Amino acid sequence: MQTLIHLFRNNIREYGMVIALVFITALFWFLTDGVNFKPLNITNLILQNGFILVLAIGMVLVIITGNIDLSVGSIVAFIGAIAGVLIINNNVPVWLAVAIALLAGALIGVWQGFWVAYVGIPSFIVTLAGMLIFRGLTLYLLDGQSLAPFPESFQKISSGFIPDVFGGASIHIFTLVLSAVLSIVLIYLDFRKRKIQLQYNFEVIPIWITIAKLALLILAINWFMYQLALNKGIPTVLVIVIVLIIVYTFIMKNTIMGRHIYATGGNKKAADLSGIKTKRVVFWVFVNNGLLAALAGLMFAARLNSATPAAGNMLELDAIAAVFIGGASMAGGVGTVIGAIVGGLVMGVMNNGMSLIGVGIDWQQAIKGMVLLIAVGFDVYNKNKG
Amino acid sequence: MSAYILEMESITKTFPGVKALDDVNLQVEQGEIHALVGENGAGKSTLMKVLSGVYPYGTYDGKILFEGQECQFKNIKQSEELGIVIIHQELALSPFLSIAENIFLGNERQSKSMIKWQETFAQSKKLLERVGLKESPETPVMEIGVGKQQLVEIAKALSKNVKLLILDEPTAALNETDSENLLKLLLELKNQGISSILISHKLNEVSAVSDSITVLRDGQTIETIDATNEKISEDRIIKGMVGRELTSRFPERVPKIGETIFEVKNWNVYHPQQTDRKVIRDVNIHLRSGEIVGIAGLMGAGRTEFAMSIFGKSYGKKISGELYKNGKLIQVNTVSQAIDHGIAYVSEDRKTYGLNLIEDIKRNITLANLTRISNGSVVDENKEIMEAQQLREKLNIKTPSVKQIVGNLSGGNQQKVVLSKWIFAEPNILILDEPTRGIDVGAKYEIYSQINELAEEGLAVLVISSELPEVLGLSDRIYVMNEGRITGELSSAQANQENVMHLMTGTGGN
């Protein structure tokens, strides 16, 4: 028990958010009489929030370097407009249009990264300008009108599902198979890590805690996948999000590049004097954010099945809120991809749950605001105490 | 009853897993200067935080009596109201505000929330006279030097009717003249009946002004030495601090000096903003493997600027000159090129330029040479822990784990982390800028031993220090700088305080 309390105390930041997510989910389960746990709703939850999670992943890197990006909402709209003009007005093949749109996103990142990293203008200013510039360009491209509909192949980006290769009738068998494989991989990875730690003679957490933790995690994953299997299986959006989570968590946790990003945000001067090219780091983080914002823009346009001038309005604030709820620090140097995802899910579950029980958009906004304040307040309180 | 202004009785303060203070007693007499000395992490700062209410009543055990009354401070404000004022090592002044505004910050001369400027300036003037600072109260604080800022802090304390003044390392950032003035002021205040607690690593100062000296070690009171009648020697104090007699402040070493491995030729550097101002002029130096070379000079002589300009042009504009390593001309335009060429620079300001304070020890240590623990671009975290643990043991960094956040370590331990970081980078040429600033005698000795060991391994070590005894004690050879020029080169046999000081001040040596 002692070790458990100790473990919890040292990781309160990470566990706290997960517990909050579980609590909020449970609360809505109670309030909606379990509707929010229905297979259809879980699928919807993913489809509704996929692009916010993608934005949050890009944003957390920006915030870790000690910067901010206010322009991603406008980039989402602008990229949607580019896709609309190319595909709907000019009949450009979908794959080419997607490639051009992603490239455009990266170039926007190059533009903003240049001003922030190499000219030294605060990112707040550069991206505030970007917010106006790209919203303006969206209006120009679309001539103030919405463009619709997109061809079906484009809509698949957000509404597609992984096909069931086993051809299950009432249940999606491939999803269940994947779920089992995923569980085994998780068990393998955890025990391998443990074995290596033992080889190095490091202190390891007691085996029963490891097993309990794994059991809970696997139970949650399998239950979740089972619900998806009851509906139409795994949405394409979920695949995109999970791949991004794995890739970016790996980069941030295990690579030199990740270390350089944390070091730049933690103390830029010290990082400079350690041979880290901090300007280059900040530049590429912005390029990356432009690229991910473009991907989110495509997902958003595909889901709406139109390119509209007002698309992605205020989305940047959702992404930023998700990152801060997930434990990142305004000052930089702190934050994780998983944290940002959990933060995004907290927002998503609340949006979804409040819509289900019929809370109006007015109170939804106010309640989300309070949750952001309380989550960060809790964080600050913990830090001051420690 | 005696005239104790402050009695702290069996103070015990525990943090999770650590007993920071264990039954500590401190008694300060009315109107004395009481020095508090001890190694890093001995508990001096914690004790002062308990006293001032940073750690509120209830979070520690023990009793505090101030002027005979028991005190239960909940915050700093309550202790200040009774006249206990702490001046921290890092000054708490607002740079853009004037001296007068700073003095009365949070304690404004006012009537109905409107500031009474006449009174503010008039009273400031009087306070400035009391501390002997000849500046107009309207001068912005950023325009005066650190020494004078320290005096403003004291004036601020006086404005609060201070009875017990606590100074935490007041002279750490001051040059010798400023330090002397400050100590004179302390004695002056003592005559006016103000008691003070002086926390300092500079034992010569402690021995010069204190009436009694309390020594802390590992969170316990070791002894209180009465110094009213006789001058206590530094060695006597050190004995109490480390629990052993330090026969020498510098570890023994037999230099094994090899070939010249690094040369700087015709080095010229201009100021980064005032681009017509030359900061470094025609500097030529060489370093040999296994050799410890000192650079002596006064503040502003250009030592740090010189070192940083060599280290990947981290300082200055229009840099000209050549660098040679093992006789070959090398191009060093960025810090990473410098590191690749085996040059390492340990900054004088570890918090601003050396460490990422919110990260843990291991990640700080490996930052400058991540490729050493990586496969391709993937960091091996287990290897990282192993390497960090080895360095922790080698340098005796006092912490239970390398996963400790660096910001929570004491100054000496932080310095050891910075040093570990650059040892981990495997340099051939190690530049140390003020390697022992603000750390205690025991840790200093350990760092000196490390420096010797590195030289033994064949590194060329360049030590920049404002402490003349340190330069003289460590170096095999000394360059002296004055106003951006090398004004002399002396072997350790030739060098002594007098001739180096002459060269430093540009008054001609020998």
Image (cartoon, rainbow, N blue to C red):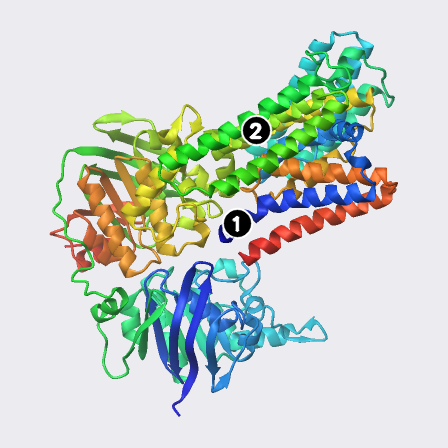
Callout 2 environment at 10 Å: few (<14), some (14 to 19), or many (20+)? some
Q: Which residue is mark 2?
A: A248
Residue type for callout 1:
Leu
B54 or A279: nearer the viewer: B54
- In the figure, is residue A329 to the left or right of A235? left
Say whether marks 1 and 2 touch (CB < 8 Å): no
- Chain of the residue where label 1 is placed in the rendered structure: A
Q: Position of residue B331 (x, y in %)?
A: 33, 27
Neighbours of disc 1 within 10 Å: few (<14), some (14-19), many (20+) = few
Identify the residue at image location x=85%, y=37%.
A356
Are the residues under marks 1 and 2 on the same chain?
Answer: yes
Which residue matches tag 1? A4
Q: Which mark is residue A348?
A: none
Q: Residue at x 82, y 24 (%)?
A: A139
- Give the camera-side residue of B69 and A90: B69
Q: Report helix, strand or loop for mark 1.
A: helix
- Spot occupied by residue A316 in the image (x, y as percentages of width and height): 72, 35
Q: Work out whether B66 lies above or below A67.
A: below
